[in-house]
Image (cartoon, rainbow, N blue to C red):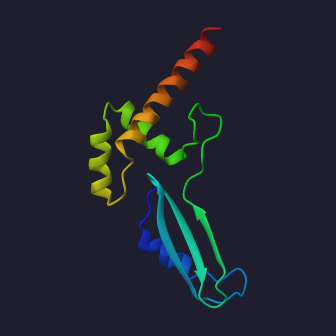
């Protein structure tokens, strides 16, 4: 999901704190990896802080580290269109979003290839 962070911050800062129920919260957004972000809501009254990530991690994949779903999906989409990292970088610049590094992109492509090969072997049985 692509979302205007100004709108998200305005929406979340209008929510009451889940501890003290006061409407005095700040929202901060920081990139985690690629297109995944961490959103943190902090109450200015009781200083309680809680957060959530914008994307879940994938389970049951061949990667050594579990990738974020949003990153895998965007790389899979660009690959299926016949576009590579440079096109993804251009898209990221146009959307004012951080881009996945070339190394991470290549790792995703390698892992996607391995997973597709595994599916082909299983489907032949």
Residue at far right of view: 19
Quarter of the rendering occupied by the C terminus: top right
Q: Residue at x 55, y 15 (%)?
A: 120
Q: How many marks?
A: 0
Give coordinates of residue 115: x percent, y percent. 55, 25
Q: Residue at x 64, y 85 (%)?
A: 47
Instruction: Describe residue 91's horizontal placement relative to residue 109 as left or right.
Output: left
**Quick check: 16 above or below 82?**
below
**Quick check: 112 above or below 78?**
above
Instruction: Describe residue 18's horizontal placement relative to residue 104 as left or right.
Output: right
Res 22 quadrant in image = bottom right
Q: Residue at x 37, y 37 (%)?
A: 78
**Quick check: 3 above or below 21?**
above
Instruction: Describe residue 58's horizontal placement relative to residue 30 as left or right.
Output: right
Res 50 quadrant in image = bottom right
**Quick check: 42 above or below 34?**
below
Q: Residue at x 32, y 58 (%)?
A: 95
Residue at far top of view: 125
Give coordinates of residue 114: x percent, y percent. 52, 23
Give coordinates of residue 110: x percent, y percent. 45, 28
Instruction: Describe residue 17's horizontal placement relative to residue 109 as left or right.
Output: right
Give coordinates of residue 11: x percent, y percent. 52, 76
């Amino acid at each position: 999901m692509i979302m205007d962070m100004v709108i998200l911050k305005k929406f979340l800062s209008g929510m009451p704190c889940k501890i003290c129920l006061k409407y005095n919260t700040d929202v901060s957004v920081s990139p985690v990896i690629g297109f995944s972000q961490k959103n943190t809501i902090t109450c200015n009254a009781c200083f309680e802080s809680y957060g959530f990530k914008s994307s879940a991690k994938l389970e049951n994949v061949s990667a050594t580290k579990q990738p974020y779903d949003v990153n895998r999906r965007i790389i899979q989409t660009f690959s299926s269109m016949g576009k590579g990292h440079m096109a993804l970088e251009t898209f990221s610049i146009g959307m004012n979003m951080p881009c996945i590094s070339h190394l991470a992109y290549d790792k995703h492509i390698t892992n996607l290839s391995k997973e597709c090969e595994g599916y082909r072997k299983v489907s032949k049985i």
